[in-house]
Amino acid sequence: MIDFKNLTLQNIKQKLQLKKPWDEVIIFVLNILISIPAFIIAHQNLIELNWILNLDRIILFLFILIATQLILRLLRTIIIICIILYLMVLFYGTVSGNYGFQSVYEDYDSMIYTMSDNPNPQDIIISKLLPFPNKSKILSAIEYQNPKVRNFAVMAINKNFKNLKGYTDYRTLIQCFAVFKEINSRWNYVSDPKDGDYIATASESLNYLSGDCDDHSVLMAACVRAIGGTPRLIHTKGHIYPEILIGSMKDLETANYLIKNILFPKESYGKQLHYHIDERNQIWLNLDYTAKYPGGPFMSEEILGALTLN
């Protein structure tokens, strides 16, 4: 039985200092996980010296690796205790079906993927530490099961592209584009009150089809979700906009043909589609209120956070 009265920090430290170098392995793995994003930030923000064989960047990475290793070894005991507690929490999350090991892997993979293609990678880490703005309010406002929202989406489907045939596999996507056309052709931008954000519910926005970017995103996401599409909201600096899941590159090719040749030929003539590719290589198409066609130009492309509605 463990004597908790005598379980002091010094005793814990002695118990952790086993003959096997397992703690050194943990520290080294943690060092790698920290050093990779730290190097990406340094690489993007420091001037390149253009040394032969990129020796300046190799030296930079080794410096970060060594410095991080020294710091972690100084704090070894505290870090090992925190890691053990964290692993216990993740184990419980995995067993209970909540945030667990798979979620941590996906978040880290997503963070590294996004940082590597971002001119300000430090913003990605900040976004991971901070919650999606007004997340709980936005989730509550996306009333995709509200009959009023569902009926509006069905009305948009019957009004736009109703008689299009020959694309059964892409019927849901085409119907989501019909919703996009109905909302964006009628949307009127109205600012929030000066004293703070006002998150309108999807059913509320249907009264006048007016509001700011988060109101538009909420309504678009709710309508897309109500008819079987998969939307997500993208948070950037001072802006939120919706995207829709397209799928693979093959699916994007079909969507590109439909948009440019059948559904939005005038709006998209001579223009390209704007999209993001996530860490699973899935393609998300822009549905912002500023776009005249699905995949129109981004108002703000940089991703600080994403909220997916599965």
Image (cartoon, rainbow, N blue to C red):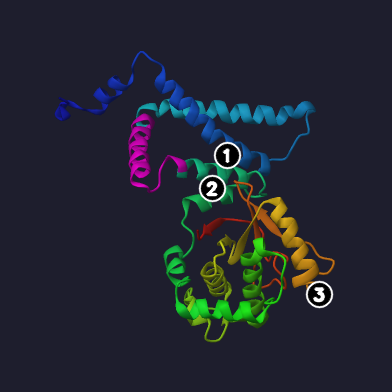
Magenta portion: prevailing SS class: helix
Circle 2 sits on which residue?
125
Residue 48 vs residue 133: left or right? right
Identify the element where label 3 is drawn. Answer: loop
Q: Which residue type does callout 1 highlight?
A: Pro
Q: Which tag is nearer the camera, tag 2 or tag 3? A: 3
Between the C-alphas of marks 1 and 3, the distance is 43 Å
Q: Magenta residues?
A: 79-102
Q: Which residue lies furthest to the top in this view?
A: 19
Quadrant of the rendering where the N terminus is positioned: top left
Residue placed at 47% from the left, 54% from the top?
130
Dot 1 lies on which element? helix
- In the rendered image, residue 269, in percent from the top left (x then y), is placed at 83, 69
Q: Is mark 2 on a helix, strand or loop?
A: helix
Taking the magenta stretch, the answer to whether it contains residue 64 is: no
Q: How many marks?
A: 3
Q: Do the residues labelled 1 and 3 touch (CB within 8 Å)?
A: no
Image mark for residue 132: none
Name the residue that disc number 3 marks: 266
Q: Are marks 1 and 2 in contact (CB under 8 Å)?
A: yes
Give the percent coordinates (x, y) of residue 45. Answer: 66, 44
Q: What residue type is labelled 3?
A: Lys
Please indicate whether residue 170 sits to the left or right of residue 264 in the image: left
Q: How far apart are marks 1 and 2 (CA)?
A: 9 Å
